[in-house]
Each structure stands twice: as C-alpha cells, then as structure tokens.
Amino acid sequence: MKKLAILFFMTFNAQSQEVDDLISNIESKVIEWRRDFHENPELSNREFKTAEKIANYLKSLGLEVQTDVAHTGVVGILRGGKSGPVVALRADIDALPVTERTPVSFASKVKSTYNGIETGVMHACGHDTHIAILMGTAEVLSKIKNDIHGTVKFIFQPAEEGPPEGEKGGAKLMVEEGVLKNPDVDVIFGLHIASGTDVGVIGYKPAGAMAAAQRFVIKVKGKQTHGARPWAGVDPIVVSAQIINGLQTIISRDTELTKEAAVITIGMIHGGVRNNIIPEEVEMTGTIRTLDFGMQKKLNDEMMHRVPAIAEAFGAKAEIEIKEATLITYNDVELVNEMLPTLQKTAGEKNVHLMAAITGAEDFSYFQKEVPGFYFFLGGKPVNLKSEDASAHHTPDFYIDESGMILGVKTFVNLTLDYLNNNPK
C-alpha cells in the first residue's frame, strides 16, 4: 500500500507540474488573442467574425465544435480519455456600444449602429479577456485529454449584454436550444474580470452573488392642452414625476435593505415635442435590481399597484409592464464549498476574498437555473492603481491589466480537473 501511495503521489505531482508548465507557456498567446478580439469587437448577436475565430481554433485542437448556437454562439466539446462527469465552462463574447478612449495600441476603432444611432464599439466589460482565457483553458486541457476523467464543454456565449430589441439571444436562448444537453452538464463555472480588483485576487460569494435585472416600461396618459392653460388638461409629465418619487419610496421606506440591496432606477423618459404643449403621453423605462426572490416579488407587486394608483390620484391613467432580463446569479452553496479549496490553492488563500453581493446582473444565471453553477470574479486592476482611480466597466476608459489573465486560465483548469477527479461516475 505504501508503494502504491508513493506511486500515486509521484504521478499526481508529475501531472500537476505538466499542467503548470502548459499554463505558463500559453500566457503570451492568451494576451495576443485578447488584443485581437479587443481591436475587433462586435455587438450582441452580431459576433460573426469573433465566433469564426473561436470555432476555427477549437477545431484546430481536435474538439467537437458546434456553431450558430443562439445565433452566433460556439460550443466546443472535449471528451476525456476516462469516464466521468461533464463540466461546462462559459465565456461571453459580445462588446458594447461604447467609443473607446484608452491609449493602448490595440484600441478599437470599430463603428456600428445601435438603436439607430452611430456609435463606437468597444470591449468595455472585459469579454475579450473572457474569450482568451477560455481559449487558453481549452488548449491546456486538450493537451492532457487522455488523463481527463470526464467531458468538458466550452461555451462561448453571445449577447450577454442583451440581444437587440425584438430579438432573442444570450444564455437564455442557449439553454432553450439545449446547450446543457448531449452530453448533459453536471456543473458550470464562469468568471468575470474586474477592473477595480487587484490582479492576483479572486472574489466569490455563495448564494446570491449578482442581482436579478428586470426591465420595466410605464406609459402615463393624460390630456393634452396648451402649456399656457394647464388646468384645461391633465399633465402626464407632472404625474410621471410623482410616480418616480413613489417608486423611490418603495425602496427607501418599504424595502428591508438590511437584508439585501435593491434598486429601482428610471433610465429614460420621453414625452412632448414642444415647449408650450403639455403632451398626451409620457413613457418611462427603467430597471429593477434584486438579490432575493421574495424581495423581487414584493417590489414587483408594489410597483404594479402603486403606479396606476398614483396616476389615478392625479386624474391620469398609467400602465406598467415588467419584463425579465436576468435571474439572480445564484452560486450553488455546496458547489462553492467544494471548490473553494481549489481557488485557494490556485491563487493563494490570502488572495481569495469573500465579497458582498453586487447589483450588477449576469445572464449566466440562466445556466445556474438548470445546473449547479459557480460564478466568481478575477482581478484585473494594476496593483499600483487605487481602486477609486480605476475606470468602471461600460465606460470609454475601461482598462484591464493583462498580467491577471493567466490566473483565470489556471483557475478554470484547476476547477475543471479537481471537480472531475473528485466526482467520479
């Protein structure tokens, strides 16, 4: 028995060293891929060239490749040499309608049209790094294919930022099209680069980690009249102002914010065409962010009641429609507990931080609705830069320190191998 234990230990260490060497040797390629995707970004459901590059590379690794999944998504399947469970790894691939302002040599100069408006296009949320990290992970795992106990699905997902108006897309459509089937996925892992977190640091949270996002539209109907005679009509602009105040008191007075954070935001208001005409109708659009299923229902119910009631009190009518955008990004507690030691051994225990939930949203949540999932955050901020000076995601100055990307590859690889080795089928 002692000889067998020594032999296993020697074999395990040899394999670990081989994997570490493979990861170290791929860093320059990961950075090169990232810069290419950054310089050539594409908007949601329009990631045609991005998808082609990904598919061609996965094919070169000998993976089974599926294309045109949820329009422009790509899935690579790596079947290990030994039986075992199925692990999925996900990267989102779309860019944003943001005009880049960073001074890097590979800055995007791409222009496109979004909602009828000409705009620059930029990977202003780090999805370019996610693509490159997952491609690097695929290469490393493909080189040790015969030693893998199970199957790995590499999911390159389009339209995480939301499909264009009137189109379906993103993780929800991928799930509908069966991306987690054939072979059936047991667990899924995902990561997001974080511009405000130091390179080398990983942040995680069990249970609700990111908020559910809901989009709502309110239409307020009054009575049009001359701006000089407001008493002759019903002003939907004034009524809209009262509704906005009423929505904010749902948060500030009727929501138990010590339990979890919640947000109701009006982002757009449209009404009127001239300074001296009180219009007939105003339309408002906004977002709801919640981290608790019960709180979400309470907010929704209260909004559906309060909006028409406030309008009626002022002699107007109002309709509200609430649409689902994403679910709560809910990290399976058992899976987090099982894989936390892997994060700690990969990044170092002092570099793995328990974080508070955030009100940003992620459609990775649709995968987690179907199978246990674990979504974590990877530091991308230069260590000599103060967090308050780091440019936020979705802004023209968004910047990522590329030296942090290799930890993403290493973490994905180790999560995959540890789960497959510790959960035999």
Image (cartoon, rainbow, N blue to C red):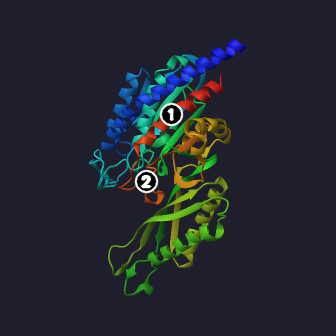
Q: Position of residue 91 (x, y in %)?
A: 46, 38
> Which residue position is annotated with label 2?
393
The numbered disc on residue 33 is none
Tell me, yes or no, if residue 370 can be seen here. Answer: no
The quadrant holding residue 2 is top right
SS of the residue under disc 1: helix
Q: Residue at x 44, y 39 (%)?
A: 405
Give the amino acid at mark 2: His
- Kindly identify the residue that appears in the image at 64 percent across and 46 percent down: 206
Q: Which residue in the protein does label 1 denote?
A: 410
Reading the chain from its start, which is encountered first: label 2 or label 1? 2
Q: Residue 227's spot in the image, x, y percent?
A: 37, 83
Q: Nearer the viewer, mark 2 or mark 1?
A: 1
Q: Quick one: SS at disc 2?
A: loop
Q: Residue at x 46, y 22 (%)?
A: 142
Q: Residues within 10 Å of mark 1 (few under 14, many from 20)?
A: many
Q: Which of 102 and 292 lies nearest the eye of the viewer?
A: 102
For residue 401, side relative to residue 326 (left or right):
left
Q: Are marks 2 and 1 in contact (CB under 8 Å)?
A: no
Q: Is residue 104 left or right of residue 423?
A: left
Mark 2 is surrounded, within 10 Å at the Cα level, by few (under 14), some (14 to 19) or many (20 or more) other residues, namely some
The reply to whether residue 359 is in sight is yes
What separation in Å lies between label 2 and label 1 (alpha carbons)? 24 Å
What's the residue type where badge 1 is placed? Lys
Position of 367 relative to 103 (above/below): above
Vertical placement of residue 308 versus 36, above or below? below
Q: Nearer the viewer, residue 174 or 193?
A: 193
Dividing the image into 4 quarters, which one contains the N terminus? top right
On the rendered image, what quadrant is the C terminus found in? top right
